[in-house]
Structures are given as structure tokens and as C-alpha cells.
Image (tube, rainbow, N blue to C red):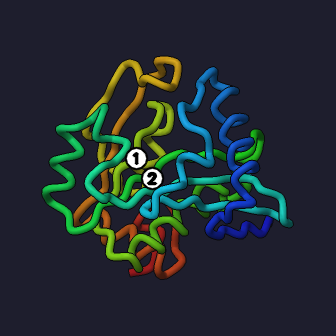
Amino acid sequence: MLQITVRTARTRDLPKIAELKSDAYSVRGYCSRKGAQEQYLKSSTFALMAEIDGEAVGTMSVVYDDGKLPTDELFSVETSRVRDTSTQLAYYGTFAVKAGMWRSGTNSIGLALIHEAVRRAKLDGVDAAIIIVHPRHVLFYKALGFEEVARRDDMPGLEKAPAVMLVITGKAAQDLFERCTTGCMQARMNSCPG
């Protein structure tokens, strides 16, 4: 089994993050509106970096709500509803895994990134999260406890790709936080102890 390490990215990691994003999104014909450097200039934003044997294999951005989230422009009503019912809201943004490495047994790179994002969010007092994904990824997030709240047929900045907004709040968020704290990140809750 591969050993995946996830850590907070540093400034020197930004070129690798940009490369991972470009490779992951261009393979589907998408383009990203912002460069990696520009995206992480806000103090409420950070990136996670997944590595295997020192090689960058995945990244995920996390934005804590400071009154303006990337979802406000395209899903403003839905974002406001979540914001109104949470104490601290996080947006899990750009999520990229090196081509051909999405799955590596039960310890997938994607799960490792989400595990660390959620673990850190809990420590920072986050009680709700939003993510926007392509429809083909919806089942993965629903298995973690996210709920679909909105869809768009075209997403500006991503070559008019379809997009789904999912949220996790309340008991589902607490359950996911608990699974991350105990280290049990299987997608199905019944496979985890108590």
C-alpha cells in the first residue's frame, strides 16, 4: 500500500500545484480562471499538497468564509442559505489528482486530501462545507455525507462544463468530522466503528 502524506502547501509548492491543476483540468478540456499564486494570496485560503515518496500527486484548496466565497457569484442563493445556518463555513475548491493516480487502493489520494481538509476544518471551528464538482463526482461526495443543492449546465471559467453544488452541514458534517478525527474515512458510515 502506498504511503500518502498530506501537508499544507508552501509558496515553493505553487508551481507544482499549478501543474497538477493544469494537467487534471485540461485533460477534460477545462481551463482554470486563476493561477495558483493568485488564488492563495488571501489569508483565509490555503492549499493542501498530497505526496507519495516526495512526489506531488494531489492538491486541494480550502477557503474559509470571510464574507466572500467563490460560490457567491454562481450559487449565491444556495451559498447564503448555508452561510445563514452555519457558524463557520468552508469551501473546498480546486481538487486535482495526478493523472492515473486517482485510486491507490482504499487509501486514495482524494480521500487523503479530504480527510486532512475536514480534520483541519474541525480544529478551526468549521461546521459546514461547500464543494462544486462535475456531475460525475457527485456520488463520491454523497457517499461522504454531502447533499446536492444546485446544478448548472455551464460553469464560466471551466469551458462551460456542468457543475453541481454540494453541501455538508449539521449531523452529516459532524459525522464526517468524527470519521476524520478517528481516522476512519471509508465512504460508508456503517463500515466505521461507533
The amino acid pointed to by label 2 is Tyr
Numbered mark located on residue 148 in the image: none
Residue 56 placed where, x, y %? 77, 56
Q: Which residue, given by chain and number where applicable, does mark 1 sit on? A: 131
Where residue 189 sits, quadrant-wise, is bottom left
Q: Which residue, given by chain and number where applicable, does mark 2 sit on? A: 92
Q: Residue at x 42, y 56 (%)?
A: 63
Name the foreground residue: 114 vs 183. Answer: 114
Relative horizontal placement of residue 10, taking residue 174 as reference (left or right) = right
Relative horizontal placement of residue 39, taking residue 126 as reference (left or right) = right
Name the foreground residue: 101 vs 33. Answer: 33
Q: Give the vertical position of 99 relative to 161 (above or below).
A: below
Q: Give the vertical position of 176 relative to 55 (above or below).
A: below
Q: Residue at x 46, y 80 (%)?
A: 181
Relative horizontal placement of residue 39, taking residue 152 as reference (left or right) = right
Q: How far, Cα to Cα, is label 1 from label 2?
A: 5 Å
Q: Residue at x 54, y 54 (%)?
A: 40
